[in-house]
């Protein structure tokens, strides 16, 4: 009697409707796997892009001092130029007075 029950359950699972569910489940698993793989690839690309941007920002930070003058350094340089021009002007005024 137990054998008849087991064969009945086997017959139930081997019915074409159950095979269809198995095929749909397999298709669903494949689609989900492809989606997860695509999301993983996309996340890796984003991660690599962020790492590249960090490297670029670091390179810019290193290059800035060699390409640009800081505001306080520029002010000091202008002050030196103005001081020299003032001395030249004073000398010219002194010479003109003589």
Image (cartoon, grey):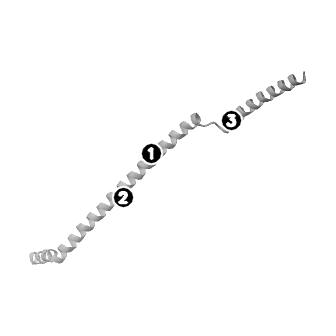
Between label 2 and label 3, give the one nearer the viewer.
3
Disc assigned to residue 39: 2
Could you say which quadrant of the image residue 52 lies in?
top left
**Secondary structure at numbered mark 2:** helix
Q: In this view, does 76 lie above or below 7?
A: above
Q: Answer with mark 2 or mark 1, whichever residue precedes in sequence.
A: 2
Could you say which quadrant of the image residue 70 lies in?
top right
Q: Which residue is drawn at 83% across and 25% down?
A: 92
The reply to whether the C-beta atoms of the residues labelled 3 and 1 are less than 8 Å apart is no
**Secondary structure at numbered mark 3:** helix
Quadrant of the image for the C terminus?
A: top right
Quadrant of the image for the N terminus?
A: bottom left
Q: Answer with mark 2 or mark 3, whichever residue precedes in sequence.
A: 2
Could you say which is closer to the camera, residue 61 or residue 6? 61
| Residue 57: image location, x then y, percent | 51, 43
Q: In this view, does 89 lie above or below 10?
A: above
Q: Which residue is drawn at 47% across and 46% down?
A: 53
Could you say which is closer to the camera, residue 64 or residue 22? 64
| Residue 89: image location, x then y, percent | 82, 28
Q: Which residue is drawn at 63% across and 36% down?
A: 69
Q: In this view, does 40 lie above or below 13?
A: above
The reply to whether the C-beta atoms of the residues labelled 2 and 1 are less than 8 Å apart is no
Q: How crowded is mark 2: few (under 14 residues within 10 Å), some or many (20 or more)?
A: few
Q: Mark 3 points at which residue?
A: 74
Could you say which quadrant of the image residue 97 lies in?
top right
Q: How crowded is mark 3: few (under 14 residues within 10 Å), some or many (20 or more)?
A: few
Q: In this view, does 96 lie to the left or right of 24?
A: right
How far is the residue under mark 3 from the one under mark 1? 32 Å
Disc assigned to residue 52: 1
């Amino acid at each position: 009697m137990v054998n008849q029950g087991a064969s009945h359950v086997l017959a139930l699972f081997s019915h074409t409707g159950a095979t269809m569910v198995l095929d749909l489940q397999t298709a669903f698993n494949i689609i989900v796997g492809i989606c997860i793989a695509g999301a993983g690839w996309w996340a890796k690309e984003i991660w690599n892009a962020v790492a590249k941007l960090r490297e670029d920002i670091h390179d810019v930070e290193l290059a800035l001092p060699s390409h640009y003058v800081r505001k306080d350094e520029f002010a000091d340089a202008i002050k030196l130029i103005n001081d020299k021009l003032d001395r030249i002007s004073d000398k010219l005024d002194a010479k003109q007075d003589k």
